[in-house]
Amino acid sequence: MNEFLKINWRVSHPSQLECYALKEFLPDEALQFSDNDSDSDEEKYPKIFRMRRVDYTPGLQEIKSIKIQSGIDQRGHQVCLEALKLFQSGKDRSCYTYKENQSAATYDKLKMVILQENAKYLKYVAQQWQEIDYFKQYFNENVTDFGKCIWHKKKLRLKSYPQFYKELLMINTSLNEEEEIIEFNCVENNLQLEGFAQFCNPGLKSPCQLNTIKLESEKDKVQLPLNEDEGVLNYIQDVDVVISSSSIKHLVDTTESGKWLLPVVIKTINNKQVAFFEKPFSLNDVSNKDLAQTTYKRLIQKAFCLPEPKPKPTYRKWLITKTHCLNSLMKTHHKPVNLKVLIRNKTVASETINKTLQDVILKPKIEMQLKYGANIQTKSELIGEWASLFFRPFSNLYRVRISPVKGEVICLEKCHIQKVIAEAQHHYHYKPQLGLATLQKVFEDVSKLPVGNYLLRHLPKQGNFISVLKQSDKQEFDFYKELDQRSLSDCPNWVPLDCNFILPGFEALNRMPGMFQPRKTNLKRKMQTDVG
């Protein structure tokens, strides 16, 4: 309130307003009265200026006009776009208006044409990536430099762990759903959202470019390892496993792209053995996009949270139970296995929904081919989003889509866990929730190991298996050498476009996503259709 009272609200002239304020807050055809009561020699009479609002659409200038024509005309694109938005709204079809029913019928009639053109469009865009776009990826140097700084800090932090290890065992993380039931229940939550910054969803009525100057103060911040975090020690009673949310995202990612190392420290605390799963390190080569992703994650937090966010660790206790199915064979029966797990999250901001404060997760999504449309999420990204939402109950995730050239925010997409699961099944025929079995199996096997330093490793060739390495004097596996072999690559792999995601620019142009430039509508034919 004190900061609010300090603000000088009096504005003597519109020139004192910032340019975006004039665009956002002055209505169309507003009349501005200017009082020339001054000592100037000009004739003294009031002047009236007529101000017109300038419409702005994020990313509209980025969209490229393609010479290849669509099989559907402009009118068809407009009607199908209305139908697509209607389907995505989730409105019950029995509640459609007459016009909405007509739009839906037109879309259903043209569905095969749309799907065939989607396939051709994706093939064309992939070709453009290989021939042109792959070599024209521009990122602000400040953005990539900050990302490099964070990446090198991760490597230095990991070098505080022992250097040499030997392979101890392999953990099979596959689940037989007909024999075992895995249940996760949150039993304790210390999250108090009252002290956090408030998320402010931007209207994007004027350009919003992320400012890298605000990152200077972030370079020296380092989070303590879990086994040294005093906050963890306050909640560690009766806990078997302590893990961070970033480690969970890697553990559940046993896909073909899941390539990572994860240190584990097992200690005895209060006469009880506890396994600490420390922060992981990806073994994939790091691209400029990955570096920018790290930077933009911090920038969007600063841009859309007020006052300036101060991330704090929060802790949740989970009870994991494994039981056998009633219809399973007697020889596979086992006693129920119970594990208590403490998860540390970094909470940044909250928002008020239905008079209730809810946790907010902001995730940058860099659009590498914005001129053609929006990219789908990779399989690993969807797994990470699912883990974030599952282990933060009643939280909201926002994908902030960003143009890599200017760092301009294009749109914010709110996602719930059902949407993420649906996307994973649609694009990859994969169920992210199967990762719960992976976590249970790893926690159960690792918690049985004796006190010491360990390393978990997953490589694409291992599939559902995760190898466990134990600290050793023998130089079988050099952890430091493995870290140093990671390099920076110029560009990421191509990611297909989402043929159902409507960017603001496509909506402004009445153009269907995932399709070529609509051909002009035959006016005579349109008039006959309207009359009919």
Image (cartoon, rainbow, N blue to C red):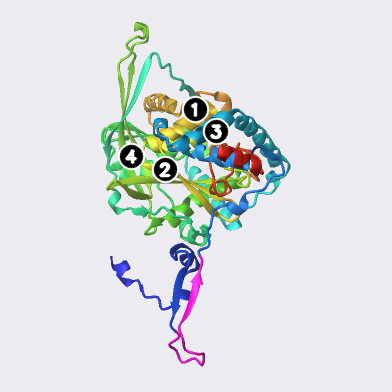
The residue positioned 28% from the left and 52% from the top of the image is: 194
Type of amino acid at the residue the image marks with label 3: Thr
Looking at this rendering, what residue extends furthest in the front direction? 531
Question: Which image quarter: residue 414?
Answer: top left
Cα separation between marks 2 and 1: 19 Å
Q: Nearer the viewer, mark 1 or mark 3?
A: 3
Cα separation between marks 4 and 2: 10 Å
Of residue 309 and residue 452, the one placed in the foreground of this image is 309
Looking at this rendering, what residue extends furthest in the top direction? 330
Compared to 443, does 518 lie above or below? Answer: below
Mark 2 or mark 1: whose residue is earlier in sequence: 2
Label 1, on which residue?
Answer: 425
Can you give x and y, in whole percent of width and height, for residue 421 in the image? 45, 31
The residue positioned 60% from the left and 42% from the top of the image is: 527
Give the label on residue 106, or none.
3
Cα separation between marks 1 and 4: 22 Å
- On the question of residue 147 being in view, the answer is yes
Can you give x and y, in whole percent of width and height, for residue 431 in the image? 46, 26
Q: Are marks 1 and 4 in contact (CB under 8 Å)?
A: no
The residue positioned 31% from the left and 32% from the top of the image is: 318
| Quarter of the figure with the N terminus | bottom left
Is 259 contained in the magenta span?
Answer: no
Type of amino acid at the residue the image marks with label 1: Gln
Label 2, on which residue?
Answer: 397
**Is disc 4 placed on a helix, strand or loop?**
loop
Circle 3 Cα neighbour tier, 10 Å, few/some/many (<14 / 14–19 / ≥20)? some
Can you give x and y, in whole percent of width and height, for residue 155 in the image? 53, 45
Label 4, on which residue?
Answer: 394
- Which residues are drawn in magenta? 36-52
